[in-house]
Amino acid sequence: MEKKKKKFKETTVGKLLLGVASTINPTLGKVLEGVTSPQEALAEITKADVPAEDKVKLQQMIYDHQQVEMKEISERWKADMTSDSKLSKSVRPLVLIFVIVCTMLLIFIDSGFITFAVDDEWKELLQIVLLTVIASYFGGRSYEKGKSIGKK
């Protein structure tokens, strides 16, 4: 059974963004009604014909939300590292290694080195996962390091 993907305006973040946008400026709420992703929402906010201060308010709220989200992820990772379980301590590096190995294998398959057909959907999925894992691993570590340097 295939799971139907929610439209952006039906997600929790989408509802929050539309509600806040309507509160700040009703025009922004109308502009964001048809968007399907956060990226499209940010693009529409930039193009909207509303006062710059309203755009700045909404963009600041989105930025603040992203900062809180990064902090929560960092706290979760910190809890994993203080755990007694070796698996919880090594899950991020293992996932990173696994995804990179899968990507290299897919490159060999796609180049014809190994004769096997891989659909484009799987290639796109692996690309998204690879980018997410690498950005999360190295971006999260950079955020943690910057935070620890800032405390000193």
Image: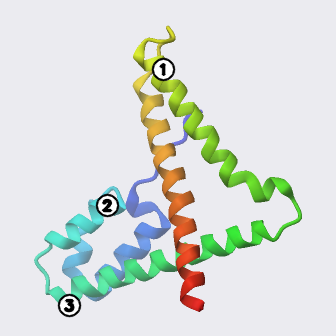
Q: Percent position (x, y) of residue 124?
A: 42, 35
The numbered mark, 2 or 3, whose residue comes first in the sequence reads 2
Q: Secondary structure at mark 1?
A: helix
Q: Residue at x 78, y 58 (%)?
A: 88
Q: In the figure, 19 relative to 114: above or below?
A: below
Foreground of the two, 29 or 73: 73
Q: Identify residue for label 3.
A: 53
- Can the viewer see residue 149? yes
The amino acid sitting under disc 3 is Glu
How many other residues sit within 10 Å of disc 3, few (<14), some (14-19) or many (≥20)?
few
Q: CA distance from mark 1 to mark 3?
A: 51 Å
Q: Is residue 60 left or right of residue 117?
A: left
Q: CA distance from mark 1 to mark 2?
A: 33 Å
Q: Percent position (x, y) of residue 61?
A: 38, 83
How many other residues sit within 10 Å of disc 2, few (<14), some (14-19) or many (≥20)?
few
Q: Identify residue for label 2.
A: 39
The answer to which quarter of the image holds residue 2 is top right
Point out the frontmost of discs 1 and 2.
1
Q: In the figure, 60 relative to 35: above or below?
A: below
- Can the viewer see residue 33? no
| Figure colour scheme | rainbow
Q: In the figure, 101 relative to 117: above or below?
A: below
Q: Identify residue for label 1.
A: 108
Q: Residue at x 41, y 67 (%)?
A: 14
The numbered mark, 1 or 2, whose residue comes first in the sequence reads 2
The amino acid sitting under disc 2 is Gln
How many other residues sit within 10 Å of disc 1, few (<14), some (14-19) or many (≥20)?
some
The amino acid sitting under disc 1 is Phe
